[in-house]
């Protein structure tokens, strides 16, 4: 496989906007570290099916009930505060369920979760498992970014950490494509 000039997609789900903010920081970090000619797109999980030609797919989602959201947990979020338009209707779990396969696609996943909780669970670990099962090749371990409560805000420093993670991810994906080329 060759991923010299990679087409990348950061696909996110977000109720209150924090996972979206992390997704934008991850995408910025990726853009800063990818070879020229690469393309980093960012899309909401409600937007569309997987576009053709994506070499690196990164998913981001809020952790709900220790894993990926379900319609009931998204409805619960909407009862707790103002959520983004369309957020209740579409989730990463359903988006992944609709995917046919991911052969020859590098994959990674991040989530947001609550800081300081004894046991948070991880939407990203579950998502990465699904991505792998679909044939994707994980580039890095699942990563979590912290919010200080259900409705946020993000813990200070997490957007910087997200940018760094995005850059690390891009370097790892480029290196694995170079090794495979
Ligand atoms: C119904 C519901 C269930 C949640 N369950 C968990 C959980 O199991 N573990 C956790 O760390 N955070 C949990 N949270 C907090 C979310 O992770 C937090 O709202 C999210 O990271 C905020 O990101 P967003 O603004 O992109 O939605 C839950 C939130 C809601 C609304």
Image (cartoon, rainbow, N blue to C red):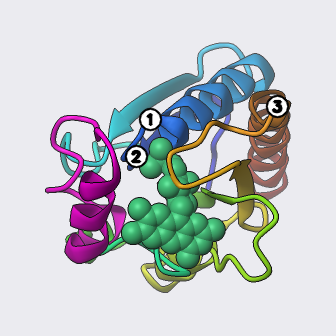
Mark 2 vs mark 1, CA separation in Å: 5 Å
Label 2 residue near ligand 1, CB within 8 Å: yes
Label 1 residue near ligand 1, CB within 8 Å: yes
Q: Is residue 137 visible?
A: no
Residue, far front: 80
Which residue was labeled with disc 2?
14
Of 138 and 6, the residue lying toward us: 138
Residue 113, horizontal then vertical, whole percent: 64, 60
Mark 2 vs mark 3, CA separation in Å: 19 Å
Relative to 112, residue 129 above or below = below
Which of the image's four quarters has the N terminus? bottom right
Q: Which residues are magenta?
A: 71-94
Mark 3 lies on a secondary structure that is loop
Residue 86 among those drawn in magenta: yes
Q: Is residue 140 visible?
A: yes
Residue at 21% x, 64% y is 75
Mark 1 lies on a secondary structure that is loop
Mark 3 vs mark 1, CA separation in Å: 15 Å
Residue at 25% x, 53% y is 78
Residue at 76% x, 72% y is 117
């Amino acid at each position: 496989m060759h991923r010299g000039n990679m087409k990348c997609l950061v696909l996110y789900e977000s109720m209150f906007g924090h996972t979206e903010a992390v997704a934008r920081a991850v995408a910025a970090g990726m853009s800063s570290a990818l070879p020229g000619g690469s393309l980093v797109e960012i899309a909401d999980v409600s937007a569309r099916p997987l576009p053709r030609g994506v070499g690196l797919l990164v998913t981001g989602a809020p952790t709900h009930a220790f894993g990926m959201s379900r319609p009931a947990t998204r409805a619960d979020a909407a009862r707790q505060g103002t959520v983004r338009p369309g957020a209740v209707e579409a989730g990463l779990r359903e988006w992944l369920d609709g995917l046919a396969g991911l052969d020859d696609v590098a994959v990674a996943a991040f989530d947001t979760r609550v800081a300081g909780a004894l046991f948070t669970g991880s939407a990203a670990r579950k998502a990465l498992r699904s991505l792998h099962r679909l044939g994707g090749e994980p580039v890095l371990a699942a990563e979590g970014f912290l919010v200080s409560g259900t409705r946020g805000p993000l813990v200070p420093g997490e957007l910087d950490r997200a940018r760094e993670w995005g850059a690390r991810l891009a370097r790892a994906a480029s290196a694995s494509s170079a090794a495979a080329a």
